[in-house]
Each structure stands twice: as structure tokens, then as C-alpha cells.
Amino acid sequence: MVDKLTARQAIEALRNGVPNRAAVKTLGCEQPAVEERFDAMLSEVENGGGNTRNKGMLVSGDFGTGKSHLLAYLEQIALSRGFVCSRIAVSKETPLYDLGKVFSSAMENGQIPNRKGRFIEELALRVSSDAGVLQDFSSWSERHAAQGLSNLIFPATLRIYQEALDFALSADITSFWAGEKIHVAKVRKGLRQMGETQTYRFRAPRVSELPPQRLRFAVELIKAAGFRGWVVLLDEIELIGSYSVLQRGRSYAEITRWMGGIPHENYPGIITVGAVTEDFATAIISPDGPKKDRDYARPRLEQSPRHAHLAEHAEEGMQLLERQCLPLARPDDADVNATIEILRTVYSRAYDWEAPRIESTGGAGFRNRMRYKVRSAINEWDLRRLNPSYKPNIAVERYDPSYDEDTYFEKPSSDDTE
């Protein structure tokens, strides 16, 4: 039996449609096919099979079928097995086509097992607390830069963080690793104070080259800190349907990256799970749909001198969304009623009030989605708890995601200019 505070937290999260740890722990998740595949990916990384390339999977389901709940559930599994996790909702502030913003969100939302501190600082402190581990990580960073796979600013900042006593500069360095800007002059000043300016002679990195280098540096930092790997959970991928055709094409290429499909960009230790609505491929990619990205996305990228190199990866990303999404199992009446009964017990505990039983029967179409059943039950209990004589009649209104292009995304960004 959960305690009263945890029960209240779970109910409040479910009432608002945002599953938290308490809600996930209370209700569990009945998606055995997804869980089995996720377990296999975790096991492969744990056993050393993830040392060559990052891995990923895509899941699809209708709105309200529990995609966000599933990702929160998978996050708890990964944390319990020694992985760090980042759960990211694709949004206007975090557009999928912009790796830099997605990476920054992943670092901001990073979770470490049994720790509550700032993600990047916790990782850096764990590595720096062991001289042997820090030396091994520094050697990796030096080799990676010497091979031309990253800018020399990464081993340079690591060296400063390791030896300098400038705490403000150390904070700037960890923020840089997490995706923020840093003045190169500060880095060079730190090197001068250590007498290392000749050892680390580097040019200021281009903004466009930093995100994939930061991603590789971060996952190696995570492993050096003693964790199995990094699980990245991408929610609401369907939002890319609101982008311009060029931005959608770039987003498809990013999906290929996160799924481990770009041969020369490897991020061993990263496992990505992405969730998308089940009708996305039909509505956005299919030549029979209104946007026909199968016909238009790749040619649009090929017309762009800046993004033409992404065309092949975008093609693969579209194929992944069309053919490789694992559909979520739809709950039957027994599943729904079992969930509502668990929820009734939790609600009763949360409010010290015996919630009445609610027998749920299969509704037509959207009315039978788990999201609607859960929120309807909570609303009914709320009303009856406040007024026991009241007999509520819950009205349910259908919600479907819109794939209309958003004017926010139609405005050319600096990344879209030729």
C-alpha cells in the first residue's frame, strides 16, 4: 500500500495527464512486447554489445493510449539497472531537427539513479573524484581529438577542470559540456595559467559542429562516471508534422541518428526510444496523405546546399517511421477495469475516502482510450467526494493531434537559410 503523499502525487499527475514516477509505479505498464525489446537493448549494452553504435526503437499508438506513460515506465526500468535517463518532449522550444536544442534538453532533464543534483555537475564530480578514471577519460578525449573526431577544446576544458582552481571557470566548462556557450578567451586564459597554451592550440569551434561532438563526449562522460549507458526517451515525435517540409526532412535525418543508422556517427552506450502517433506515417509521409513527404522531403533537402548531405538519412528516417514502429497493445475491458480498480484504491488512500467502484465498459472509438477512462474516473470521484448525492454525467470530447504547419515553424530560422 502506498503512503498518502505518494497516492496524492499519483492522482494529481494522472488528473493533469502527466504521468510522474508515483503514477507509473502505482499503475505499472502492460506493454510486454515493448518491454521485452527494451530489456534486450539494455542487456546488450550491459554485456558490452553496445560498444560500437547507439541503438533505438520507435513505438506508435493513438492519442491517449499511454505513450508518455510507457516512456516514464521505461525510464524507471533503466534507472533501476544503472543507466542514466533523459526524457524529452519534442516542442517548439525543442525542435527535433535541431540536435543542439535536443541535446541541451537531454542534459537539462537528465536523471541519475538515486541522485538529485544537476545532471552535468553530478557526472563531472563522479569522474573527477577518481584520479584513475579521470586519467582514462582524459586519454580518450585526447585520442578522439587527435583523430579529428572532436575539437581540441574538449580535452582542453577537461584539463582545466581537472587541474585549475578557478571555480567560476569550472562552472562555465561544465555548462559548455551541457550545451551552453563559452568564451574561448576564458579557456585560453585558463590554459595560460597552467602553462599549457602550446599543448592545446585550437580554433574556436563552429556552432554547427558542436552538437554531435558534445553528444559523444557526454555519453563517454556518463560511462566514465560508472553508469551503464544513457537512455534517451523522445516523446511526441508527431509534432514534426507541424514543421516546414525542410524542417521535417531534417527531423527524419535526426531520427536516423538517434536510432543508430548513420555509419560515421556512432554514440556507443546511447539507447533511444521514440514515441509517435500511429497515423503519422499515413498522414505525413505517405504519397497518399496530404503532405506527401515521401515525394517532397528528400528533394527539398537535395535543393539545399547546407542540408543536401542529410537527404539519404532523411529517407532512412521516413522508412523507420513507416515500417519499424512497434505498435502499442490496446487494452481490453479487463485491462481497463483492473487499472481503474487499482486507481480506486490509490484515490481512497489519497483522500481518506472510500471511492465507489466504477465498472468500465468498452466505448466506441476514442472513448475507450485509457487516458479518457482514467481521467473520467478521477473526475467522477472528485465530484462524488465533494457532493455524495450528486450523480455526475461525464462528457468526453475527442482530441486528435493536428498536423497543420505552425506559423512558428514556417518562419525561416538561421539553420534554414541557404
Image (cartoon, rainbow, N blue to C red):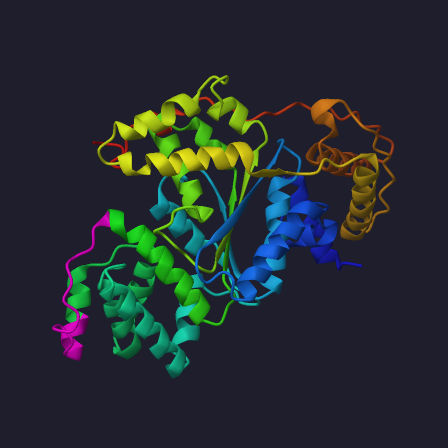
Q: Going by the picture, which residue comes out furthest to the bottom? A: 131
Q: Is residue 219 above or below residue 208?
A: below
Is residue 64 in sight in this rendering? yes
Q: Is residue 345 left or right of residue 256?
A: right
Q: Is residue 323 left or right of residue 198?
A: right
Using the image as rendered, state which of residue 120 and residue 212 is in the foreground.
Answer: 212
The quarter of the rendered structure image containing the N terminus is: bottom right
Using the image as rendered, state which of residue 12 and residue 342 is in the foreground.
Answer: 342
Residue depicted at 13% across the width and 72% down the height: 197
Q: Is residue 104 above or below residue 307?
A: below
Residue depicted at 39% across the width and 82% down the height: 132
Q: Is residue 268 left or right of residue 367?
A: left
Is residue 12 in sight in this rendering? no
Residue depicted at 66% across the width and 50% down the height: 35
Please state the horizontal and vertical placement of residue 261, each as a whole percent of the image.
43, 46
Please state the horizontal and vertical placement of residue 251, each as a whole percent of the image.
40, 36
Q: Name the magenta segment's main secondary structure.
A: loop
Q: What is the quadrant of residue 370 in the picture?
A: top right
Using the image as rendered, state which of residue 219 and residue 341 is in the foreground.
Answer: 219
Please state the total of marks drawn on the protein image. Answer: 0
Q: What is the quadrant of residue 149 in the picture?
A: bottom left
Please state the horizontal and vertical placement of residue 58, each as a whole percent of the image.
55, 42
Task: Tell me which segment is drawn in magenta.
Answer: 190-207
Please state the horizontal and vertical placement of residue 329, each as a whole percent of the image.
70, 38
Q: Is residue 308 left or right of residue 83?
A: left
